[in-house]
Image (spheres, helix red, strand yellow):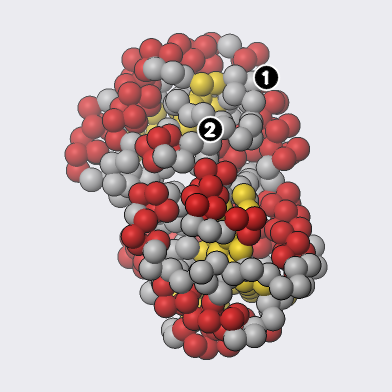
Amino acid sequence: MRIAYLAHSLASCWNHGNAHFLRGLLRELALAGHGVEAFEPRGAWSLENLLRDHGEGGLSAFRAAYPELEATIYDAVEPVVDRVAGADLVIVHEWNEPALVAALGTARKRGARHTLLFHDTHHRAVSEPDAMARYDLSGYDGVLAFGETLAEVYRGWGWGERVFVWHEAADTRLFRPPAEESERRGLIWIGNWGDDERGAELETYLFGPAQAVGLPLDIYGVRYPSAALATLAHHGARYHGWAPNAGAPALFARHVATVHVPRRFYVERLPGIPTIRVFEALACGIPLVSAPWHDAEGLFSPGTDYLVAGSGPDMERHLCALRGDPNLRRALVASGLATIEARHTCRHRADELLAIAARLRARTTPERAA
């Protein structure tokens, strides 16, 4: 099968978490024998920011970890629409420009023979519905939503059985426990500050508890304003700036535990959708403690795969327990790894994608959303 994926960026993971999953997915599809092409626009904001901050060296980790992956850069919409016309399956990420999304849908309505899917991996459907309304999806065969609550939003927009829940997952060819254990110290948190969508939660469930129990805390990420950096300094946390996602396994391997602090929209408006870091941390064999988050879809086994803290004091107790109890750490690691290997690898998602495509191709006269 020929598969084309139109991404915001494949090369850059600067404030662009979808690149994490996309890289592993495309590699799995290629290794399974499919012809895979990725496309990204010239001047993508994620890549531009990465190059501005780190130059070409910022791409070294990606290139070393994924030598088989390279995206075609395009300047205009029409040539890329023509280029993917011969594919069997075309997937379009929601961070693409509305003009491209519409042009691909128009080509499909005019007779392009590929299956055309829209891939939504963000909370904008509930946080910025007017922005999402700019996307003309009338020519699309289906929608891939990265959680059930997001899929339900699309069902409310008339997509019915043509919206599919397709979670992110860990690229276990890269994200895995270290071959040899070395000394682990303190906590690590890898995440972007963003638009203060979880600032209070980070202070309650991460900065404060780490300081209270005396665990060194290393922070990696981008878009930390001066006020956020002052908060980190106040709590004694060490801020290291951006780290390439391909380097995350080595960073996890140096630390005793990590913490999951979901953004507010995923707690209040789209419950049940974890961040990619949950999949990646468990795959790397690092104990994880989560701030309040309801695993509405039963993706994991809370309390067994990871610990859950209902309050700041709860987080402090869990962190103390992890620091002092190697048996607890080993049990969490073993359970989390088993869950990832059984259900949540990029190999699983590649198989799910192919099954979705086959189901849609089996429809002789597919309905289309208005």
- The percent position of residue 248, horizontal first and vertical second, equals 53, 44
Question: In which quadrant is the N terminus drawn?
Answer: bottom right
For mark 2, what is the residue?
Answer: 254
Q: What is the number of the mark on residue 331?
A: 1
Task: Select label 1 or label 2 by which is in front.
Answer: 1
Q: Amino acid at mark 2?
A: Arg
Task: Name the residue at 28% across, 41% down.
Answer: 196
Nearest the camera: 280 or 326? 280
Q: Amino acid at mark 1?
A: Ala
Q: Position of residue 77 (x, y in %)?
A: 47, 83
Determine which of the numbered discs, if any, sits on residue 236 in the image: none
Q: Is residue 240 above or below residue 143?
A: above
Q: With 90 as the anchor, is 12 left or right in this view?
A: left
Looking at the picture, how far across and down is residue 351, in whole percent?
76, 55
Sequence-first tag of 1 and 2: 2
Question: Residue at position x 19%, y 39% from top?
Answer: 227
